[in-house]
Amino acid sequence: MRPTTARRSLASLAMLLTAGLTLTACGEDGGSESSGGTSPGEGKSECAGLTGFGDLTGKEVKVYTSIVAPEDASQKDSYKLFTTCTGAKVVYEGSREFEAQLVVRVKSGNPPDIAYVPQPGLLKTLVTDTGKVAQAPETVSKNVDEFWGQDWKDYGTVDGKFYAAPLGANVKSFVWYSPTMFKENGWAIPTTWDEMTKLSDTIAATGTKPWCFGIESGDATGWPLTDFVEDAVIRDAGPEVYNDWVAHKIAFNDPQIAESVDRVGDILKNGDYVNGGIGDAKSIATTAWTDGGFPILDGKCAMQKQANFYAAQWPKGTNVSETGDVFAFYLPTTNDKFGEPIVGGGEFVTAFSDRPEVQAFQTYLSSDTWANEKAKATPDGGWVSANTGLDVANLVSPIDKLTAETFQSEDAVFRFDASDQMPGAVGAGSFWKEMTSWITGQSTKETLDNIEGSWK
Amino acid sequence: MSTAEKLLQLFIVLALFAGVMVAVLVIADRFRTKRGELVQTAVFVIPAVLMITLGLLYPGLRTVYESFRDANSTQFVGWENYQTIFTDKNQLGVLRNTAVWVLVTPVAATFIGLVYAILVDRSRFEKFAKALIFLPMAISLVGASLIWKFVYDYRSAENDQIGLLNEILKVLGFDTYRFLLTEPWNTLFLILIMIWVQAGFAMTVLSAAIRAIPGDIIDSARLDGVSAMQMFRHITVPMIRPSLIVVLTTISIATLKVFDIVRTATGGNFDTSVLAYEFYVQSFRSFNGGLGAALAVLLFALVTPIVVYNIRQLRRLEAR
C-alpha cells in the first residue's frame, strides 16, 4: 500500500468536493487498476484479458532489455496486438550493457517501466538493494499460475512476494551433434551418460576427437562451463540438492559437487576426447563459445554440449534439423532417480512502475496470447517459452520444437541456471573465473575451495 | 521523435544556450566599477566552478566515501576494502600486473618511438615510414585488441591455424604457442598491443622535438668529432628531454587506465586483470560497490602524481 499523509488525502478530498470531479480510485499494489474509458480492444476476442485496463490511448510503456538487433525485431512485432487492444505504445530499448546499466539506472532514479531481467539473482538484488521494483498485479500472478507452474513462479518471487513473470526461456541441457556424421558411422544417440562415455570412446578410437567446446565470452568467460557443471550436479545429486547448493545450504566444495565437477572433467579434461579441431583441454578456455561447435561441421569433432540458443551461431546455410548438418539431443541422465532434469534460463518481466498501462503490458506478456504471437512473429526460429499455453505447432524451427517439447515433457524437472541465481560475486564472478582456471589446469579441490571462499 | 521535432528541440537548446550566455554577459557588463570587477569575475567563474563541483568533485568525494563502506553501501567498514586489495591473492595479482604494465609500456613505446624517429629522420622513405607506425593510433583500443586476438589465436599444431603468429611458428617447425593463456607472459603480449598503438604517438612528438634542435649545436658537435652514439647520448637526448618526459608520462597515464585491451583480449582471465578493469568488474559485475570504489580511489591516487608532473613539464615545454 502506498503511504499517504493525512494532509494529502484531505487536500484531494477538498478538490473532489469543490470541482465535483469523479475520480477513479487509485489501486493498491497487487491489484490491477483501470484508467477508465472504453478499451479500443472491446469486443475483440484476442483482447479478452486486456480490456479491463480501459482506454490507454496515448500512454507509453518504456521497455529496457538485453535483446538487441536482429532478435529485437520479432519482440517489437509481437507487441502490435497489445497496441491494437489497449491503444498504449511500447517504447523499446535494447542494450548489450544491460546488466551493468540497469542497476545504475535504477539506483540513480531513472528506471525504465519494465526490464527483462535474465537472472533471478539480479532480480533479487534489485528488489532488496533498491526497493524500487513493483509487485506484479493479480492478473499476472493468475496467468503465471495457469501457464507456468510453481517452479517458474518461485524464480520471480523474492521474500514471499511475487514480482516478475517469466518471458522467454532456454534449455541448456542439450548436446549438439551432426545427424549425418552419426548416420554415416552408425552411431546411435546415447540415452544414458554411460552410453555417452562409451560412444566417446568409440569415436576417439577412430582418431576423431569426440568433443569440442569453447568458453571464451569476453568478461563473462567461463559461463558455458558452469552450465555443464550445473547439468552434472542436477543429474548426480538431484533437484533438491541443486536447490540447496544454489541457496548455499551446502558448501560449494561439498563432496557431491566435487563429484559432478570431476564427471565433467572426465570429458573436458580428457586429452583423448577434446578439443576437436582446435587443440587440447586448455584451448577450451581461449575458444570463443560462439565458435566452439564449428569443428562439428568440418567433421573434426562429434559433440558439443551447448544450449538451444546455439542454433543462432551456426553459419548461414547450415541445416539445423534431425536429418541435417547439426541438431541437438537431450544431455543423458547419469541415473534414473530424478526424472528428466533440465537446466535452463529465461528472462523475467520486472516492473518499476504500477501505472495501468505498465500492468496491462505485464498482463499481456504473461498470457498465452503473447507467447503464440511471439512464436508467429519469429519466422526464422530461435525463440521458445516455457509457457504451457504455447502451441508447439506455432514454432517454426525443429530445434525450437524440440526445446518446447522438452519443457512440456511429463518427466521434466526444470531448474534455473544456478550461476544466475547465486550472488553476483559468485555466480557472475568467482564461479566463472575459477572454472576457467580449472580448465587450464587448476585442481577440482582448489577450484571449489576458492569459490566457497568467495561466497560471503 | 520525428526529424521536425528533433530540429525544434535543437533550436530550443541553442536558444537556451544563447539566452544564458547573453544573460551572463549583460550581468557582467552592468558592473563596470573597480569593485564591480569582482562581481564580473564571479559571474564568469561560478558556473564553471558549479559544474566542476557537480560533475567532478561530488562524484570523486562520493567514491572516496563509498570505498569505506560495504558492497551495498549499507554500513561503514573502515579500511577493509583497501585491506582486501593489498592482501587478497587475486587483487595482489591485479596490482602486480598493473605495475608491469606501467613499468614496461611507457619505456618500451617511447624507446621504440625514439629509435624509429632517429632512424627515419631525413631518410628517403620518411613520410611513408612515419605513416606506417602512426596508423595504429587511428585504431581504437578495442579494434586493436580484436586484431591482435586473431594474430595470437591458438590451434594445436596438427590443425589449420588462423592465428598469424602460430602459423609462422608452425611453418618454422616449432610447436604452436598459447599467447593469451600462458602466465606470466600473456600480460606481456597484451602490453605489446598497447605499445603497437602508442609507439606512433611517441615517434611523432619526438621526431618534431629532434627537428627543433638548433643546427649550430649539431654542427659544433660534429666539428668536435662525436660518433653517432655520442651524438645520441650527449646531444639528442638531453636536448629533447622535456618532450621525452611528456611522452613517457602521457603513455603512463593511458597505461594506468588501460581497460579495453584486457577486457577484449582475455576478459581479465588467466591472471591478466589490471586495476581499471578490476574496478569495473567489482562495481558492475560482482556488485561489490565498496571494493570497486576502493580500487577507483587507488587508481586515482596513482594517476594524480603523474598527471601533475606531466602538466608541469608541458608548461615548461610551452615556456621555451
Image (tube, coloured by chain):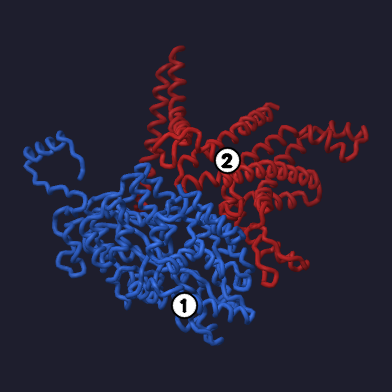
Query: Could you say which is closer to the camera, residue A456 or residue B62?
Result: A456
Q: Is residue B233 left or right of residue A215?
A: right
Which residue is labeled 2 in the image? B87
Q: Looking at the picture, how far across and down is residue A65, in whole percent?
A: 38, 56
Chain of the residue under the numbered disc 2 shown in the image: B
Q: Identify the image quadrant of residue B209.
A: top right
Q: Colour of chain A?
A: blue
Q: Colour of chain B?
A: red
Q: Is residue A108 left or right of residue B281?
A: left
Q: Identify the image quadrant of residue B21.
A: top left
Report the Cα–Cα distance between label 1 and label 2: 46 Å
Query: Could you say which is closer to the camera, residue B260 or residue B285?
Result: B285
Which residue is labeled 1 in the image? A192
Eyeballing the image, is A420 above or below B298? below
Amino acid type at image mark 2:
Thr
Q: Is residue B31 left or right of residue B214?
A: left
What crowding class fits label 1: few (fewer than 14 Cα within 10 Å), some (14-19), or many (20 or more)?
A: some
